[in-house]
Image: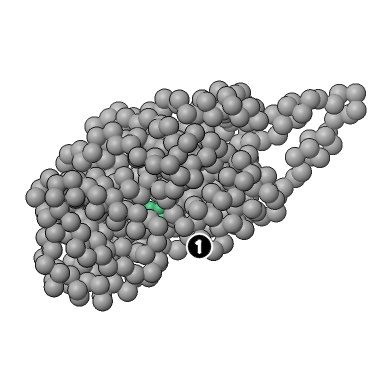
Amino acid sequence: MSFEKIRPTRRGLMKGALATVTASTVPTGWAIAQARPLKVGLMLPYSGTFAKLGENITFAVEMLIAEKGGKLGGREVQIIKLDDESKPENAPQNTDRLVKRDQVDVLIGTVHSGVQMGIHKVVRETGTLTIVPNAGANAVTRALCAKNVFRTSFTNWQPAYGMGLALGAKGVKKAAWITWDYAAGNEAGEGFKEGLAKHGGEVVRTLTLKFPDTNFQPLLAQIPGLGVEAVGVFFAGGGAVQFVKEYKSAGIQVPLCGSGFLTEGVLGAQGAAAEGIETALHYGDNLDNARDKVFRKAFQDRTQREADVYAVQGYDAAQLLAVGIEAVKGNIEDEANLYKAMRSAKIESPRGPISMSASQEIVHNIYLRRAEGGLNKVVGIAAPALADPGTGCKL
Ligand code: BEZ
């Protein structure tokens, strides 16, 4: 399946619509707007270490829209995709292309926290409705929260905090943290540390490398000498596959754990090296809920891929959008009612019970999972109904 790069397809909002009507039948601005498709920009990684994450989000968004007959709130949906390549330096320009040139009505993006901050700067200025389907940058729903920005994934703090709590509850007192040195890994590290500290444990050493480097050997070589009982990490996508394999090959005896992205959507590629790894995340492969079963089958039938957390987050982004657009019958200009409906949306997520916090962030269970036989099996709840603190958000 290929993902098109963005093309200059802007047809001119008013121009195109007006060209088809005569002066005597000139409709109102609202009628014109409703006659054109709802433009949904997907700004996601379709190349690089996070490519599969972006693809699964896309497939799930498209699946929900297809389930709705291709329309939301009575309007045809036009999707415009842009490969952000997980490059923060290109994010403002890429966001401008979607928001200002293509004039998307809604932006769904992205995966990488650094890119998200670039998106966020633009959409806070333009007021574009934005739904974050993965990137966990804490600031998006904390001090820099905005009424036009919703997130259906997590904050970087949430899963790692759950992992730290679970580890601390087992009596681990000294741990190390290893990550790519950027917002997601560093903020997850803070969460891990905080969770561990609740039970009197501490992170005695943090080791980092640049995103998306995979030169793990110098870091792995240090672990046996650290005197730690566990190693917590944040890696995802292709980098996570390599890290887990190299950790195993290095013969390190210290148990490996982390934010669930470490083993999410990549267990097939990690193979036996992942067996037994414990992680914490807001999804698992054996949740006992009917919604998840239907979702997983539909996703697998449509894409020939197993569903994972990225697919769930993309699906929920589209579900949330559908609730909002349907509430205003396609009139996305009716911001007050659009946001009100989205803030109070009752969505049935495949991940289990969710709600939306005051900072427009998802509140959900953080599950403790163990990788077994190619599945991230839920073995407990590390943190039930965990809300991000939303520190500094005034909405
Ligand atoms: C992030 O950059 O926020 C992120 C990327 C992949 C998985 C989870 C978080």
Question: In the figure, residue 203 lies in which quadrant?
Answer: bottom left
Q: Where's residue 143, x and y in %?
A: 46, 44
Q: Where's residue 147, x and y in %?
A: 53, 36
Dot 1 amino acid type: Lys
Asked if residue 219 is positioned above or below residue 95 in the image, the reply reads below
Question: In the figure, residue 388 lies in which quadrant?
Answer: top left
Q: Is residue 373 left or right of residue 188?
A: left
Q: Report the residue at 26% width, 76% height from top.
A: 218
Q: Where's residue 366, x and y in %?
A: 26, 40
Asked if residue 347 is positioned above or below residue 92 in the image, the reply reads above
Front residue of 296/132: it is 132
Secondary structure beneath label 1: loop
| Residue 68 makes an appearance in the image | no
Front residue of 217/71: it is 217
Disc 1 designates what residue?
87
| Residue 281 makes an appearance in the image | yes
